[in-house]
Structure formats: C-alpha cells, structure tokens
C-alpha cells in the first residue's frame, strides 16, 4: 500500500536525522533552524555546500525508495505508522509516483505545504509553504536572476542573492530549517496548485460543491490569484452548462451573471447565454407571453450588455407587435372598438413601438379605454348577512341611486346624476325635483323621467311592497308628477337631509336602450338605472361596460373609460407585481402595510390615493340572538378586546399605527357625528372577567329563585318563619349545585371572509375563551349555501350618513322594522327613533354624540377600529377624485392613457 | 184609570181622592216635562223606553258604466218594506231619495264625514243637515248596479251624538235581493241609543251602570233586530243642553277610550234595561254624572273590522307619533282583574301605531303603554269598533333620557366597585407573595378609580341638565320625575360610599400598607 507522500517524506527526513546520509549532512553542515542563524565562516559554508551536494547526489541516486507494492508496511492510509525496515530504504518519491493531485479529503483540511520537485531525480520534497506565493519558483528565480546580472551589488543584495540560491525550507513538524539549491529545483508545486488541479477534476466529475470548496480555500490561501479566479470561472461555466442540460436555465443564468461580473469578455459567454435564453424566449413567444419574453430580453441586455446577442429576438417581437397593431387597426376600422383596444394593448405590451406606430396605438386605446383593476376576489356569493366587497363593487358600478355621495368632509355632500336642481318650498315641506333634460356625453347612465321616480317612490311607500321603506313613508305625505321632468314631493315632516333620504334606486325604463342609442340590447330590462352593466363574468375576470357608450367622432382627448375589467389575484405579491409591470392599472384595495412601499420614491409606477371614508371595523349583534338581552355579557366581550394591540400587530402590521386608529364609534372619526370627547373602550380584562361572572350569575338567578320560592312555600305551609337570607346562607351549596350545569351559551362569531379580519377574529375568540366566554368562529366558505346562525358578526362599515345609516348597521337590517328594536331598552329606542325627528343639524349632532356614548358604554355594538382605505392607480390613469369616496368614485370620468 | 194604573181600589175617603188625583196628575205631567227634546207635538213626550226611533233612510240608486238597469223606486219600496217587517213599531221609518247635495254614490258615502253633516257655528249653534228635532237616525244607503251585480253600501249617522258609523257593504247578484240585503245592512249599521239611568255598587264593591234602551219597550218583530245583548259594547257620550232651551244641544262631549261592557239585558220586567261595567282610563268615571241639562247617552256599536289601529301620540305635540313604544295587550274585563290569557307584547311602528286584533271572546281589552320603568298609560280598548283611534300620552322623553343616563351611571358605578374589589384582592395577593411594590401599585390604582366625587358630579350634571329641559318645556311632571329618579340614585351613591364603608376600607388599606412595609 502506498504510503502517503507526506508521511514518506517525513520519514525520510527523520532517517536523515537519525544518522543516515542526511544525518551526515547535519554534522557537516548544521542545518539552519527557524531561529536566527549565526554568521558562518567561508570554510563552513564550503563544507555545507559539499555535503549538501553529496546529499543531493545520494538522494538522486535513490535515497527515496519506492516502496514495493505489497510490502508489509504497517503504514495506514494516513501514513502515520513508520516501518523501521523501510526507513533505511526510504527515498524521496518521484513526482510521477505521487498522487497528483491529492484527493479532496487530503487537501481540504490539510496544512499548507509545497512539493519541491528535484530537477535531477524528479523526486519530491514535501515542505512547508515557501514564499513568495504563488509561482514561488518563478518569483524566486526571477529575483535571483535580477540580482545576479547586476555587476555591483550591495552587501545586502549579496546576502539576498545567497539566500535565493539556497532558499530555506521547513519540513512539516520539524523546527529545523533546511536549505536547498535553487538550481536543483525543477518546480515548486504549491498546495493551491494541487487544489486547483483537484478542483478541475471535480468539475469534470460535476462535483461542483467540493470543487467550490477547494477554490474558496485557494482564495483564502492566496488571495487575488488569477489562476484561482480562472478556475472559479471555469467552475461557474461548467455548472451553468450542467443546469442548462438539466433544464434549469435560470440557475444557469445566475451563474453566468457571476461569470460576467468576473470576466465580461469570457469567450464562452455569448454562446452559453444564447443556449440558455433562446429556449426561454422561444417558449414565451410560443405561449404568447410577450411580457415574459420582453422581460427576458431586457434582462439579457441589462445583465450582459457587452455580450447580449439578441437582436434577432428583438426583431421577432417587433414584427409580432407590428402585426398585432395592424390587426387592431383593422378591427377599429370595422367598428369593433373593444377588440381593437385589446389587441392594441397587447401590441404595446409585446414590444416598444416606434413613434408613428405608438401614435396609432394611442389612438386606438384612447378611443376605447379599458382599465384593469386588481382585486382579491370576485366571489361575492358567499352567504353573509351584508354585501361583501365584490358585491359592493358590482353594485357601485351597476346601480346609480338618485342621490349619491359626492364628497365626505365631516359632513356628507351629495350629487345627483339625474336631477338638475331641486327647490324646497314651504319651509321645506315640499320640494320640486327638476330632472336633467340633457346628458353629458361622459354620463354612462340614461336620463330618467319623473314617472320613474314616482314609480320608485310608490314602491317604497306601499306597505305591501317588498321595497317598503317605513322611514321614507313617515316623511313623505304625497307626490305629484308635474311633468316628465318635474316631480313634486310633499312631506309630513321636514327631513333634515333630503338627499340622504332619497338615496334610492330608480327602476329602469323599458325603452331606455332604443331611445338612448344603446346598441346593446342586453341592457334592456335591467331592473335599476346604473352607469355600467356586466358584460362578462368568469373565474378569471369580470368586465363591465358603459350602458350608454360615448359617441363616436369626438376628439380623442374627450373619451373616458369604456370598460372596467376586474381581475382577481390570490396572492397579493402577484397583484402588486402585475401593477408594477402594467398588467393591471388599479389596485382596488391596498393593504395598510403596502401603502408606504408603493408610495416610496423608488416606485414610479403610479399613485396611491386615500379614500375619504375609512372602513370602520365593528362587531354587531344579531337582533334575534339572546346576547342582546345580556348587557353584562356584551360589555364583557367589549372590554376584553385589546384594540390597540390587535390593530397594530395584525391589521396594520405597523407599530406606529399609521393608516388606522382605534375608535369608539361605528362612523368615521372625522365625521360630524363623532364626539371629539368620546372615549374608546379601554381594555380591561379584570372588569371583563367580573362582568362575565355577573352574566353567568344572572342566568342562574331564575332557577335559584324557583328553589327559594319552593322552599318558602314549604316553610310557610308548615307554619315556620321564613327568612330568605338565612335560608340562602344555609343552603348555599344546594343553590350552587342546582345551577352548576347552567353555563354561558356558546356564541358564534361570523367573520367577513378576509384574511386580515380572520386573523384578528381568531385573536379575539382566543381572548374571549380565556376569560370564560365560549365563542366559536365561523367564516363563510364558497361551498356554503345558507348564512349560518350567528350571534355576533365582525364586519366592516363604510358609513356615509350616520344620521340615517346607524339603524341598518346596528340591526343588520334594511327593512327598518321597528320590531327588531324590541331587545333594546326603551331609552335607547327613544334615542334611535329621535334621529328621525330632529329639527336641526345641531340637535342631530348632539343626539348622535349621545348615541355614540351609549352604544359604546352598553356595547349594543362593539366599535373596534377604523382603517384608512387606499387605491393604487398607475400613472396612466387620471380623472379620479383626489379623495374618492369609494373604489369606483367618478369612474365614468377616468381616463386611461396608453 | 187611575185605579187601574196605580192599583187603587175600593172606597176612599173624599180627601184622599184629591191627594190621589194630584199625585196622579204629577205622575202624568212630570214625564211630559222631562220628555226628551224632539217631540214636536204638545202631547206629553213618551218615555224613552217607549219612544220609537225616527229613522230617515236615504236610498240613492246609481248605475255604473256597463251596469244593469235598476228601478230606484222599487229599491226604495223594497227597503222600506223590509225595514217595516224588521222593526215594526220600534221605528218610524221614512225612505227617501237623496237631495241634490246628499251623498249618492258608494264612494261619497265612504268619504262622508261628520263635518259634511253637522257644523258648529260661531254662535255656538249647530248647523245640522239632519236636525235631531226631526229625526234620530239617518241611514245612507247607496245602491250601484254593476256588471256582476249590485253593490250596496250603507252608513248610519246619529243626529244626537253627531257620530257616523263605519261603512257596511255587500254585493248581491239579483235586484230582488237588494231590498232585504239593504235592510240587513241597515240593521247592521243601526246603533241603538241608550240613556243612563243609574250607577250602583254590588256587595263586592263592583260598580255597575244601568241604562235604558230607546224603544226598549217596543220589541222588534224580527228577533235578530234585538237592540242590545250581553257582551255588547256601548260608547258613551255627554250632551250638555242649553239652559234656556233644554231641547237644544249646547255641547257634545265624546268620551274616547271609554266603554260600557254590557253584562245583562232585561227582556222581561223592564225591557231594554241594560246593565254594564264602565271601562275607562280616567281615574274618575266620566259617565254617570249628575248635572242639570246633562244628557248621558250611549251608542251600542259592534265590531265591523278584524282589527283596529291605535295611534300613540304625544299630548303636547300631536303631530309627533311615539315610535317604538312598548305596549302590552291584556285580555281581561276590569283593569284590576287577572289576565285571562298571556299578555301580547307589541311595539308601535314608525307612525306610532299598533294594530290590535279583534276577538269575539274579548270585545274589550286593556292596553298598557310603558316608557322605561314607568307605565305611561292604561287604557281600555274595543278593537274593531272604529278603524283607528288616537291615544294622547304625556311627554316622557326627558324622564326616559334621564333613566338612560342613570343606567349608564349605575353601570359605571358597578364597574368602579368591581374594579376596586379587584385591586384590593390583587393587593392582598401581592402582600401574601411579599411583593410590596405591587401592593403599592394596586393601592395607587385603587385610589385612581372614580370615587364618590366623580359620581356625585356626574349625577348633578344629569339632574341639572334634565331639570332645565323640563323647565324650558314647562313640564312640571317631568321635572318631578327627574328629581325623584336622581334622588334615588343619590341614595344609592350614599349607600355605596357611606362613611362606614369608607372607614372600613381605609382601615383595611392602612393595614395592608403597614404589613407591606409601605408605612
């Protein structure tokens, strides 16, 4: 078994020291130790030279014996065992006898060493690393030669020259220094060289990890060595090719990026890049994923600018874009505006078009503008007591009430798409509505007649109608259609906010389509008047188009959004990415923690607009549930919610709590109805627990009272004296036992299907359970068909008009049925109903202040927090309101530039 | 005759003849003097029980478009004949066609109001379309021929009570049925008149009222036309006659939400003598009074609808309905009786109205209106008699709002007490676990909790604010109620924060401090 090189060399030198030839060398010419040497005489120098020469000659004559194969050496694999018989026969190994390069294991953790290959014999002396490195021999030789040719040398140079002629070496584990003649050295192979050689072999074997380890080790040993860098580059390239063969192009590209960073003119880069990028781009083009193709090309050019050979692909995409644009132009000439716009947008996404073609694209897109809106879900069919966001958005687009909110600044201001003007008369006891007689071209909804409003009013005033509005009926005494465009309404009581009271939907006229020129007959028979109608609905997207398109032939700058396409994203990162890349133009709802990153200066994609009405998070009680009859239980639920913590940690994910705030009312904190002195319910688990206990005791009272009554009857019947206090004291255990099985009912908390709200709800349920109120959380699923039974509901509210809207939120009811108020105390019912009778704004505000305090204190509902609402618009979108009141506020005025 | 009438017989001493004659003469004269106004002739007025009803039936006959032809005279004749058969001597009936200003069509009858028939003049006189001197009742009958038959609409007007009955209607397929059916409707709308006789209490101290039906002694040939029976409801009226002319009405007073429930009708001895129980919401009975020139009459009225609507409004502001007012319907005869079935809870709607169903087993019931802890009203009601009625209730809004404020204050007090106990408990625990700093912390928290001063201030604020509002609206009752509520709350506060309790607690706290080494 071959001994390791190191052990054999070591043994050789030990034998020298022990008295063989090298020992003789030692007596004649003491070898230098590591310590500073004494000055030597010329004679001793001569003897050393002679002896050393003899040594070398004897060494070349076969001092290093190759151990015969199959020897009975006791050396192990590591060569740590010496064989005394072999010592005498040991000679330095020859280079070709040595494993070159050593194995990975032998190198990776080895102490650095050098192989000195003797010129004469080819034998190898293993020693500690010499300096300088790398290319030690060459550097020494060069320095020697440079000094040798000088005619006049200084003493130091002479000394240096001498040193160079006899470079000093150290043997592993031996403090003694030795010298060797420079001219006897054929080559010095450093460990780093061996490592690189082994690394090269490992690369060939595709063992990239170990090759990398070795190269890193080399770089540690010899920082900045070109050979190491070259080997590293070779490693990267080999690995890139490996990934390319195994269909992992992106991994390969990542490696090539590193190659490029190290050596941007590497000859293999262009071909390798081509081999990796071409299939990717070809596939993207085949799949018509031009964004991806374009992205790849861009990446190719941006990452490898000097070697990006991809002009042919650019040309390919350019051609495709040109063809697509031509198709779009053809479609537009044929009057198929929508398809033309879709194709034109595609052309724009395929490749940057030259100016002339960009103008064509711009014209096509400007004529039929499509705005793509990213949303979280299109599924509004989950059974939930109040409309979910998809339904709200749908209604906002397809239903236009007689009066809608124009802006919200403490007070709510209204506008009407149908009414030109209205004159209150007789101190407000009657009003005449003057309807619009002409419609601006950007209005997507048709004009209406007074008869349609009268029809809507009739339905709302008819107690037998499903649309009966008792509140409106209590105000309206009668109405008269004065003309097709004039309607007079008389009031039995003057309403404080006329517009808020008339936020009603108007039934569509039968013949509106023909008379308004709407070519799409599917709009006929729509139940209510609205701006947009649903064109198509599917799992992938939902699109809405104007009921009445804008007329042809106008200046292109006058056109507005013609179609709204909602696209759902399950993953918000995908949605934001799509927005940044321009695949969608609007993000309907931006999460609070996303606002600042989207607004940051690095992002030039667009703007984030804050909506005027924040979302108020609130827990409401089911009027049919018994929970409403337990004030202690309600208050316990309210007091055991750490609002600040949940808001910051879960809802906003921001310790500073920006974009949200804890609130004590169900309407916005900025509303006129919000009492500035109003207090938020403080988190108080002690009090919550005490109240929970009180609620439980209250449940047990009727049973205890029955026992007391029965006992009393018995005592009195038997003629005894009755003292209830004493009896209770004496029968405390009996009373406890009799009511031990009476526990608080398990409550069901129904939560809006929203991940953030669900997380907050889970936290609240956990806290309630901890203080002993059993609550189970339910989130409606897509597969559910009916609304499950619920006691509490965690929902969001966007309250536009507190004066009129608090009722429907409190009772989760739009029928305004007074019977639902039965569980509430008389004084609260009076407060609520008084809202319909207040005669001035100041009184209304005072009444709302009072209600805010009462609702929170008695926990008729549980206000939690409000969260600011944001919508993100790409830079191409304009025309939206500075503080929109909702996602699609003034959507008919939006403009999407190409 | 005197003998026969007064049961005198045998020989009498001459002096007694004179006395007897005088007495007999008085007996004959007095009724004549006390006779009800309206008798035109000079003959002594008949007793009320023997006085037939003077009924004027106005029958209008119209034809709708496409309706069948109809013989108006034949209709009137048929009605007349049927009524004669039905009522006999009980009625002096006259059937005529309507004059030019009288209501002629069914719609006109339906929309007829009392103001159309009688009007108060500035001179305190009455302008009557149908003077009570000439007739007791006017019955409007409208017959309209339609394509499918004949619609008959009927309504009765009492000239003395100035009261219109609800509308009764029927449809008959054949013209020969018009007369009998119309007569039947007339019988349905006819509301007999009774006059108060006396009131008395029985052995159980239950009060009863006796009334006499007009023409009670003149039984109708048709037994179905019997005037009154047990269980009927009478609506009482007060008529104040003029002093100088007792035959003319000076003032008519309706007694809404006041009824007499008939318990017994005498058909043997004094026919038409009716006994009943007065049901009223007022503390004192407004009927059965004494007074000169006071006529106390009642109309028997039977339910025509399956329910009635009762509207609750504020007395001081009638245009303001009381919405979401808590109401309970109790089925019992007298207000002090036990409920005969579970009470029905109701809430008034947005118009302040509640719908009360009529029940033939309970022609009258009691309605309780609650406002917070207070019973705002307790009224009897006979559903189905009139379609709608209004109840005027006092303004309880100030007291109710104070009740709400005090409820919140009470909860706050309970919270404070609970939290104090919690802090004390935590302090004791901290002491046991030798954590003096926590003891200090909990005691500091204890003292930061709202105390007596806070609650006294809050109570004072509630009191002052509410009293001011009551004074501003001139509502002395509300002011009194508010003071009472606040006084009760003050007592509660005094009890919670009594000196004894305070001293006890301070002693406890001091002990904790000492043991914790904080002092």
Image (tube, coloured by chain):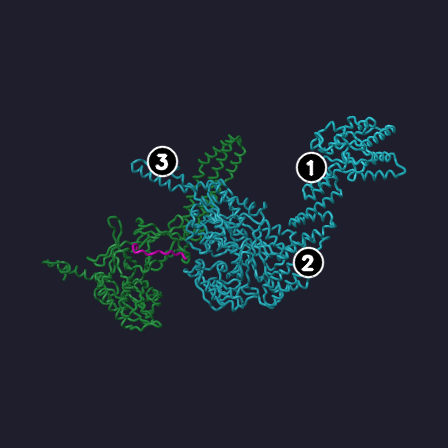
Chain colours: A cyan, B green
Residue A314's disc is: 2
Name the residue that disc number 3 marks: A727
| Crowdedness near tag 3: few (<14), some (14–19) or many (≥20) residues, C-alpha within 10 Å | few
In the orientation shown, which residue stands out farthest toward the left?
Answer: B11
Q: Quadrant of the C terminus of chain A?
A: bottom right
A351 magenta-colored:
no
Mark 3 chain: A
Tell me if B413 is positioned left or right of A261 in this view. left
- Range covered by the magenta-colored residues: B351-362
Q: Earlier in the sequence, mark 3 or mark 1?
A: 1
Q: Chain of mark 1?
A: A
The Cα–Cα distance between marks 1 and 2, rounded to whole angstroms, is: 49 Å
Residue at image location 27% in from the left, 61% down from the top: B193
Q: Residue at x 68, y 43 (%)?
A: A205
Q: Residues within 10 Å of mark 1 (few under 14, many from 20)?
A: few
Q: Position of residue A366 (x, y in %)?
A: 62, 63
Residue located beneath label 1 in the image: A105
Question: Residue B352: image x %, image y %?
Answer: 40, 56
């Amino acid at each position: 078994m071959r001994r390791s090189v190191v052990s054999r060399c070591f043994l050789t030198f030990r034998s020298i020291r022990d008295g063989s030839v090298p020992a003789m060398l030692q007596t004649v010419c003491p070898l230098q130790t590591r310590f500073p040497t004494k000055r030597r005489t010329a004679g001793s120098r001569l003897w050393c030279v002679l002896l050393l020469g003899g040594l070398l000659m004897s060494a070349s004559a076969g001092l290093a014996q190759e151990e015969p194969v199959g020897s009975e050496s006791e050396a192990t694999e590591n060569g740590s065992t010496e064989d005394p018989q072999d010592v005498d026969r040991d000679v330095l190994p020859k280079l070709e006898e040595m494993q070159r390069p050593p194995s990975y294991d032998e190198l990776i953790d080895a102490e650095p060493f050098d192989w000195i290959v003797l010129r004469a014999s080819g034998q190898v002396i293993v020693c500690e690393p010499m300096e300088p490195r790398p290319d030690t021999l060459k550097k020494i030789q060069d320095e020697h030669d440079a000094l040798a040719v000088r005619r006049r040398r200084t003493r130091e140079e002479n000394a240096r020259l001498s040193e160079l002629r006899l470079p000093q070496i150290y043997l592993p584990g031996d403090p003694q220094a030795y010298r060797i003649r420079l001219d006897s050295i054929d080559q010095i192979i450093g460990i780093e060289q061996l490592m690189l050689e082994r690394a090269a072999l490992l690369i060939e074997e595709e063992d990239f990890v170990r090759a990398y380890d070795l190269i890193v080790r080399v770089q540690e040993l010899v920082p900045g060595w070109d050979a190491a860098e070259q080997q590293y580059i070779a490693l990267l390239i080999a690995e890139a090719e490996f990934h390319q063969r195994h269909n992992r192009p992106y991994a390969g590209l990542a490696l090539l990026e590193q190659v490029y960073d190290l050596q941007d003119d590497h000859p293999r880069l262009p071909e390798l890049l081509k081999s990796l990028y071409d299939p990717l781009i070809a596939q993207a083009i085949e799949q018509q994923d031009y964004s991806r193709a374009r992205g790849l090309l861009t990446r190719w050019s941006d990452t490898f600018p000097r070697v990006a050979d991809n002009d042919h692909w650019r040309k390919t995409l350019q051609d495709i874009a040109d063809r697509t644009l031509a198709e779009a132009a053809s479609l537009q000439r044929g009057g198929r505006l929508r398809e033309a716009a879709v194709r034109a947008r595609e052309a724009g996404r395929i490749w940057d078009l030259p100016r002339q073609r960009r103008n064509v694209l711009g014209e096509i897109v400007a004529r039929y503008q499509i705005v793509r809106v990213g949303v979280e879900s299109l599924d509004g069919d989950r059974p939930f007591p109040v409309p979910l966001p998809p339904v709200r958005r749908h209604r906002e687009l397809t239903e236009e009430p007689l009066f809608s909110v124009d802006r919200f600044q403490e007070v709510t201001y209204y506008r009407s798409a149908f009414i030109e003007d209205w004159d209150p008369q007789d101190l407000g006891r009657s009003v005449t509505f003057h309807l619009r007689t002409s419609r601006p071209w950007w209005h997507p909804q048709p004009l209406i007649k007074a008869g349609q409003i009268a029809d809507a009013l009739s339905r709302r005033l008819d107690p037998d109608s499903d649309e009966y509005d008792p509140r409106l009926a209590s105000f309206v005494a009668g109405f008269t259609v004065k003309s097709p465009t004039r309607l007079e309404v008389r009031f039995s009581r003057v309403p404080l906010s006329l517009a808020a009271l008339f936020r009603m939907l108007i039934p569509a006229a039968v013949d509106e389509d023909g008379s308004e020129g709407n070519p799409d007959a599917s709009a006929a028979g729509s139940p209510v008047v609205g701006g947009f109608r649903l064109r198509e609905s599917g799992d992938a997207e939902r699109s809405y188009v104007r009921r009445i398109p804008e007329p042809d032939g106008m200046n292109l700058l006058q056109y507005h959004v013609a179609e709204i396409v909602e696209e759902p994203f399950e993953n918000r990162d995908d949605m934001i990415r799509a927005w940044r890349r321009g695949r969608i133009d609007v993000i309907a709802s931006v999460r609070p923690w996303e606002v600042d990153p989207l607004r940051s200066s690095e992002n030039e994609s667009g703007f984030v607009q804050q909506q005027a009405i924040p979302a108020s998070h609130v827990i409401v009680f089911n009027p049919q549930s018994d929970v409403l009859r337990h004030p202690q239980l309600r208050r316990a639920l309210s007091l055991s919610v750490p609002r600040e913590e949940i808001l910051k940690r879960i809802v906003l994910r921001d310790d500073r709590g920006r974009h949200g705030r804890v609130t004590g009312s169900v309407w916005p904190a900025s509303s006129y109805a919000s009492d500035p002195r109003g207090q938020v319910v403080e988190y108080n688990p002690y009090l919550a627990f005490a109240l929970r206990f009180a609620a439980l005791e209250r449940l047990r009272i009727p049973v205890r009272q029955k026992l007391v009554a029965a006992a009393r009857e018995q005592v009195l019947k038997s003629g005894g004296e009755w003292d209830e206090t004493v009896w209770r004291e004496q029968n405390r255990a009996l009373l406890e036992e009799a009511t031990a099985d009476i526990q608080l009912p398990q409550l069901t908390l129904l939560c809006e299907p929203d991940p953030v709200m669900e997380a907050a709800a889970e936290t609240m349920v956990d806290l309630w359970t901890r203080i002993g109120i059993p609550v189970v959380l339910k989130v409606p699923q897509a597969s559910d068909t009916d609304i499950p039974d619920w006691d509490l509901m965690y929902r969001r509210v966007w309250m536009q008009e507190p004066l009129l809207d608090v009722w429907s939120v409190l009772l989760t009811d739009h029928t305004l049925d007074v019977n639902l108020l039965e569980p509430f105390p008389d004084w609260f019912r009076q407060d609520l109903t008084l809202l319909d009778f207040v005669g001035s704004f100041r009184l209304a505000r005072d009444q709302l202040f009072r209600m805010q305090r009462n609702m929170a204190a008695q926990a008729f509902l549980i206000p939690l927090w409000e969260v600011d609402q944001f919508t993100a618009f790409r830079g191409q979108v304009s025309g939206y309101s500075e503080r929109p009141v909702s996602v699609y506020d003034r959507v008919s005025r939006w403009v999407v530039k190409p | 005759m005197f003998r026969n009438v007064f049961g005198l017989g045998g020989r009498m001493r001459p002096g007694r003849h004179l006395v007897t004659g005088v007495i007999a003469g008085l007996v004959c004269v007095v009724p004549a003097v006390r006779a009800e106004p309206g008798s035109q002739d000079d003959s002594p007025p008949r007793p009320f029980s023997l006085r037939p009803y003077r009924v004027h039936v106005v029958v209008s006959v119209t034809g709708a478009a496409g309706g069948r032809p109809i013989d108006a005279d034949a209709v009137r004749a048929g009605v007349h004949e049927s009524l004669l058969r039905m009522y006999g001597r009980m009625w002096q009936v006259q059937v005529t066609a309507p004059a030019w200003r009288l209501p002629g069509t069914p719609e006109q009858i339906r929309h007829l109001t009392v103001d159309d028939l009688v009007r108060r003049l500035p001179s305190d006189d009455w302008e009557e379309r149908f003077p009570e001197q000439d007739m007791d009742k006017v019955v409007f009958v409208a017959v309209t021929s339609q394509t499918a038959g004949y619609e008959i609409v009927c309504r009765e007007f009492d000239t003395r009570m100035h009261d219109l009955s609800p509308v009764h209607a029927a449809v008959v397929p054949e013209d020969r049925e018009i007369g009998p059916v119309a007569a039947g409707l007339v019988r349905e709308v006819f509301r007999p008149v009774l006059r108060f006789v006396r009131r008395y209490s029985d052995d159980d101290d239950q009060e009863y009222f006796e009334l006499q039906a007009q023409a009670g002694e003149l039984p109708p040939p048709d037994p179905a036309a019997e005037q009154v029976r047990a269980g009927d409801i009478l609506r009482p009226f007060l008529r104040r006659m003029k002093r100088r002319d007792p035959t003319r009405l000076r003032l008519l007073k309706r007694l809404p939400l006041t009824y007499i429930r008939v318990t017994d009708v005498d058909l043997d001895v004094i026919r038409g003598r009716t006994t009943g129980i007065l049901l009223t919401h007022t503390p004192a009975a407004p009927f059965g009074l004494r007074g000169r020139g006071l006529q106390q009459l009642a109309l028997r009225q039977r339910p025509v609808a399956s329910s009635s609507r009762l509207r609750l409004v504020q007395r001081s502001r009638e245009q303001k309905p009381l919405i979401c007012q808590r109401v309970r319907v109790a089925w019992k005869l007298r207000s002090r009786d036990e409920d005969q079935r579970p009470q029905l809870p109701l809430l008034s709607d947005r118009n302040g109205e509640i719908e009360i169903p009529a029940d033939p087993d309970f022609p009258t019931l009691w309605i309780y209106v609650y406002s917070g802890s207070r019973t705002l009203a307790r009224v009897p009601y006979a559903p189905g008699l009139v379609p709608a009625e209004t109840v005027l209730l006092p303004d309880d809004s100030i007291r109710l709002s104070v009740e709400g404020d005090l409820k919140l204050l009470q909860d706050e007090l309970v919270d404070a007490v609970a939290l104090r106990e919690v802090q004390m408990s935590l302090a004791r625990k901290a002491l046991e676990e030798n954590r003096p700093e926590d003891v200090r912390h909990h005691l500091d928290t204890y003292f930061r909790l709202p105390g007596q001063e806070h609650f006294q201030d809050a109570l004072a604020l509630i009191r002052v604010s509410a009293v001011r509002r009551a004074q501003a609206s001139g509502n002395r009752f509300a002011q009194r109620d508010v003071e009472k509520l606040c006084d009760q709350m003050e007592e509660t506060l005094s009890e919670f924060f009594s000196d004894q309790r305070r001293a006890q607690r301070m002693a406890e706290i001091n002990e904790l401090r000492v043991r914790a080494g904080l002092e």
